[in-house]
């Protein structure tokens, strides 16, 4: 019997899942989460983000993530009831794109940690930069332009790295740091992602970046899974020497460092496996190890993603192609206004989640043509750098209509902006916190004209990380194993959870999607006033 741990260092919390594998007997035996805002109030984060006067800037604290890891490892060791002797490997998932800037003291500092003292107190000296810009940051439009021009255009960068330049991607963020704080950049010995930084803390040596998370930097040659020299060169001087290695997602970094062995009692031969991004881990956690289906994750960000055997880049530049932890590829689109937008609407009308669901019940699919563009924060898909909620034929005082409008907007946007993937979707694996809400999933099914399934484990990124630890352990022992075998018994959707589309609503949403696109075009590009389109929709569906 073997136990594998998967961590998920997300925007708002750190979670751990332990899985037990005994031949074909497989189960999740433990799950525990620490919320950053409530468990670590001294860092003063709000929804995991440090306050900043510029709404386009979003940063968090790598010291906070280290403190959370220290606390959660101790909880696993002392409170979970897990037999630590059976733990064979640990991996993890991190919010993507965020960057951590470390000086040249890392390996010395981590090599000399005193097990009797908290981690965070001992590593303060190894940061070249105190804060880490995270994926919610949209402040690098200028740097995106500079990189795009220098590399030969958006198409060149997208073909090479899997994405055109995006504000939150690590390359533009690194460039901004170099421009604004050249001394801090100079002091930086290594730039890590959230994923590789957390793995570094566990192994006490610089961890590599895997192709899943590396593809979110605008710096990696996607097809060859190595740094793309031309992109690295134009991003910031001397950056090639500051990047960790790229290694496959099943790479064994080394044993767990003595700090965790002595402090918490983990066995000294526990393997630390390369961490990956939360979306690549989620791909595994919802069992998408073959083409044909997609997943929609409703979390802090809403994402839509699918397995891709060969990379096929988005010509319109909205989507991304990342490495899949299976060694293949994955397509993805990301929406910043996910769970926090739903929460903002809920709170604005004094509701709880039950009342939110009630409101979905009480209103008619299609909302009589009322549309919300829910850009509470600057949006990633489509690019909207000036935040602001826009309403078309939607009364701001009508709570239930606004609830329906935010959910319909999110679902229509995922459908409209995923067209480039060219996948005929008939089944969606729904995951993330809000995938518990079947009223939201009903809208998803109708808008996408697809069957939607739920899963037993809500945190698919965390489960995917544990499954990757299991896979890497087998591979490292020379065992041949398929991904279907690795995920079997863990990632099957719950059969009885199926929500099927209603053909009448599907036809109606096909019309409403055109109206929604017209509203987006009006708001972003000054396109035609969508009022006539809304009126026409109302005549048939009002
Ligand atoms: C993906 C993205 C987000 C973060 C959230 O490109 O930016 O989904 O990974 O954790």
Image (spheres, rainbow, N blue to C red):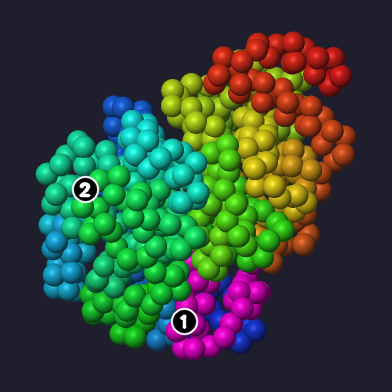
Identify the mark at residue 294; answer none if there is no mark. none
Residue 17 seen anywhere in this rendered image of the structure: no
Which residue in the structure is indicated by mark 1? Answer: 473
Q: Is 54 situated left or right of 302 in this image? A: left
- Secondary element type, mark 1: helix
Q: Position of residue 487 (x, y in %)?
A: 61, 72
Provide residue 347's location: percent of width, then percent of height.
52, 29
Give the quadrant of residue 47. Answer: top left
**Over which residues does the magenta segment extend?**
463-491
Label 2 Cα crowd, 10 Å radius (few <14 / some 14-19 / many 20+): some
Q: Element at badge 2? A: loop
**Looking at this view, is 492 or 167 the one in front?**
167
Q: Are marks 1 and 2 in contact (CB under 8 Å)?
A: no
Q: Earlier in the sequence, mark 1 or mark 2?
A: 2
Residue neighbourhood size for the residue with mark 1, other residues' Cα within 10 Å, grouped as few (<14), some (14–19), many (≥20): many
Residue located 67% across and 35% down the image: 416
In this rendering, would 37 be left or right of 276? left
Residue at 74 percent of width and 50 percent of height: 425
- Residue at point 24%, 71% (across, down): 204
Which residue is rendered at x = 37% and y = 35% of the image? 149
| Relative vertical location of residue 22 with respect to residue 246 in this rendering, above or below | below
- Of circles 1 and 2, the one toward us is 2
Magenta portion: prevailing SS class:
helix
Task: Provide the residue designation for mark 2.
Answer: 237
Query: Is residue 467 inside the magenta stretch?
Result: yes
- CA gap between label 1 and label 2 equals 38 Å
């Amino acid at each position: 019997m073997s136990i594998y741990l998967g961590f998920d260092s997300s925007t708002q919390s750190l979670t751990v899942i332990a899985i037990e594998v005994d031949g074909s007997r497989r189960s999740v035996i433990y799950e525990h989460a620490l919320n950053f805002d409530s468990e670590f109030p001294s860092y003063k984060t709000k929804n995991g983000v440090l306050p900043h006067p510029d709404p386009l800037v979003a940063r968090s604290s790598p010291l906070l993530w280290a403190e959370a890891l220290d606390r959660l490892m101790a909880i696993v060791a002392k409170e979970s009831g897990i037999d630590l002797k059976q733990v064979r490997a640990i991996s993890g998932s991190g919010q993507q794109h965020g960057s951590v800037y470390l000086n040249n003291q890392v390996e010395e500092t981590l090599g000399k940690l005193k097990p009797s003292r908290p981690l965070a107190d001992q590593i303060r000296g190894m940061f070249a930069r105190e804060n880490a810009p995270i994926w919610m940051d949209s402040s690098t439009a200028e740097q995106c332009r500079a990189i795009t021009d220098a590399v030969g255009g958006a198409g060149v960068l997208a073909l090479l790295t899997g994405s055109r330049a995006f504000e939150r991607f690590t390359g533009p963020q690194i460039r901004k740091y170099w421009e604004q704080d050249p001394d801090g950049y100079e002091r930086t010995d290594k730039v890590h992602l959230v994923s590789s930084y957390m793995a570094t803390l566990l192994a006490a040596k610089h961890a590599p970046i895997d192709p899943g998370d590396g593809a979110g930097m605008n710096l990696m040659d996607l097809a060859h899974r190595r740094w793309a020299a031309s992109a690295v060169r134009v991003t910031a001087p001397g950056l090639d020497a500051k990047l960790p290695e790229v290694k496959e997602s099943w790479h064994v970094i080394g044993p767990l460092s003595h700090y965790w062995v002595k402090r918490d009692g983990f066995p000294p031969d526990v393997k630390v496996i390369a961490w990956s991004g939360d979306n690549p881990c989620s791909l595994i956690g919802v069992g998408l190890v073959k083409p044909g289906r997609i997943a929609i994750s409703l979390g802090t960000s809403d994402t839509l993603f699918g397995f891709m055997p060969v990379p096929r880049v988005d010509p319109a530049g909205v989507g991304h192609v990342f490495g899949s932890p299976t060694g293949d590829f994955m397509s993805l689109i990301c929406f910043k206004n996910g769970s926090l937008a739903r929460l903002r609407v809920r709170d604005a009308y004094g509701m709880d989640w039950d009342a939110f669901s009630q409101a979905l019940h009480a209103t008619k699919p299609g909302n009589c043509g009322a549309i919300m563009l829910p850009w509470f924060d600057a949006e990633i898909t489509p690019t909207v750098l000036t935040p602001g909620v826009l309403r078309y034929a939607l009364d701001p005082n009508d709570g239930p209509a606004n609830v329906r409008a935010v959910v319909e907007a999110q679902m229509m946007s995922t459908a409209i902006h995923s067209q480039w993937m060219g996948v005929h979707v008939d089944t969606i694996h729904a995951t993330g916190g809000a995938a518990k809400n079947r009223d939201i999933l009903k809208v998803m099914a109708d808008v996408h004209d697809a069957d939607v399934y739920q899963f037993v484990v809500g945190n698919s990124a965390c489960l995917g990380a544990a499954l990757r630890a299991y896979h890497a352990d087998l591979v490292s022992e020379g065992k041949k194993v398929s991904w279907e075998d690795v995920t079997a018994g863990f990632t099957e959707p719950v059969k009885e959870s199926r929500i099927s589309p209603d053909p009448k609503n599907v036809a109606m949403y096909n019309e409403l999607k055109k109206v929604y696109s017209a509203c987006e075009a009006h708001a972003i590009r000054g396109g035609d006033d969508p009022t006539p389109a809304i009126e026409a929709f109302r005549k048939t569906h009002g």
